[in-house]
Amino acid sequence: MITLSGLQHWCWNDAGPFSLDMDAGRLVAEDVLRHLPGKRLVVRGTWQGKSVIAKLFFNDSKAAGRNEYSLLETLAAQGVCVPEALALLEQDNHALLLMEPVLGAGLDELLADGVDLPLLKSLLDTVWGLYKAGWIQTDLHLGNFLVNGDGEVVCLDAGAIKPVPSRGAAALADNLALMCAQATLALQAPLIQECLHFMKHHGVRSRDFEERCQHALHRRMVQADRKSQRNCSAICVESTKDGVVYSDRMDRGATGSWLAYCEKPEALPLLKKGSRISVYANENWVVKHYREVGLKARLKQKMKCSRGMISWRQGWLWALLGIPTPRPVMLVEFIRGERAGTSVIVFPKLESIALSQLMEQQRSRAQGLAEDVRRWLEHFLWAGISHGDMKAQNILVNEADKISFIDLDGAGFSSRARWAQVKNQKDKLRFEKNWEQFQ
């Protein structure tokens, strides 16, 4: 039988379906939604046969569970649309909060394919309603809102909803800047414009709002870059006899296969062989082997800036920002033995062809797709992002004419405007030269 104390000591790899017996009944957890080992665990499951969302608070000395339960009741009484709080159960120093599941779609999903202005207006009206009721969502991002079957915007994560600070409207403006920064990169410009109209309508000071959004975006990018290099809910980091393995936790069943590809990439069909880099692939995965050795390569690994590590870090960052790219699923950095200095990285294989091929064979189609690339380059300039080798061979196109960027081992980002301008100009020139090369 699993107890709350037992769950507290779960490690990352233990998170999975379980049953928890309490004095008042049994919780059957089916899916783990969020796991902060030793602190929080959020699951979807059933309580006494009823579907629930359960939030477990471990060593809850500050009564966060009780406070969140009370806050949900208060917000509901004030007319704010939040999940219904069903019960709060306490055991020793731990707490279990049970909530009614909300049926609907997340705003991040609904806005993934394009801008929906009425939906954005509904979101901002909800944020304003919270503010007028004396509350502010301190973790304001699209993933913390759902649209239910009645078309209402539901506020999630009540634990991040706090009283409006003494700064008042200035705090609201900062909060909206955080929301824009946490949206996908392509959505940020229209979202910023909607926020500016919203603040003007409600008399909220909006001077320097775009700069604040940009600053919040850079801070988020730095945090995400650091997170991709450590053990967390999305990424598993393990030491082995020869080095360090970074892997995606989302598909644990494939981890063994990925590791076998990294240990012996040459067992797969060869796609491309270079003096320092070889690329292999099967029907599902692409494996890139960086064969750099020597003192310089080992120093780069120690500083976490080998080409394999850069590709890993940038792949996760770009995917987080909604930039189309195949997010890597495993990286092995060999830091000991005869392979010290080398890296192997695994990506999902995309059903697509290179834009360079279309430039040669379907010129008009390629010209249409080029406009998508140029739009992304403008987004990159805003965010301070550079691809580093923006050639048509590094842009893939699928049957639906959706583009994806690959080969990010020369990519980077900076908050310095001059750096971004110089790098962006190089990316643009590199891309435009393709029209002469492939004709």
Image (cartoon, rainbow, N blue to C red):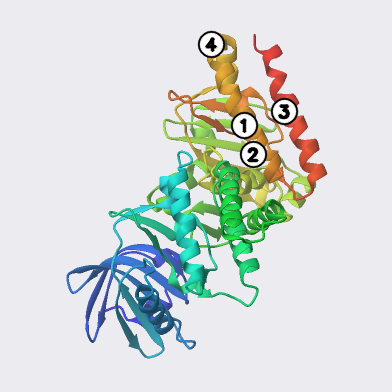
Q: Which residue is mark 2?
A: 379
Crowd tier of the residue under label 4, counting other residues whose Cα lies within 10 Å: few below 14, some 14–19, many 20 or above: few
Q: Residue at x 58, y 50 (%)?
A: 197
Dot in front, 3 or 1? 1
The answer to which of 158 and 284 lies nearer the viewer is 158
Q: Please tell me how many numbered marks the rendered image carries.
A: 4
Please say if the residues under marks 4 and 2 sit with CB atoms less than 8 Å apart. Answer: no
Q: Residue at x 57, y 11 (%)?
A: 363
Upstream in the sequence, badge 4 or badge 3? 4
Q: Secondary structure at mark 3?
A: helix
Image spot of residue 279 (x, y percent): 57, 31
Which residue type does callout 3 highlight? Answer: Lys
Which residue type does callout 4 highlight? Answer: Gln
From mark 4 to mark 3, how far is it between C-alphas?
21 Å
Q: Secondary structure at mark 1?
A: helix
Q: Which residue is mark 3?
A: 428
Upstream in the sequence, badge 4 or badge 1? 4
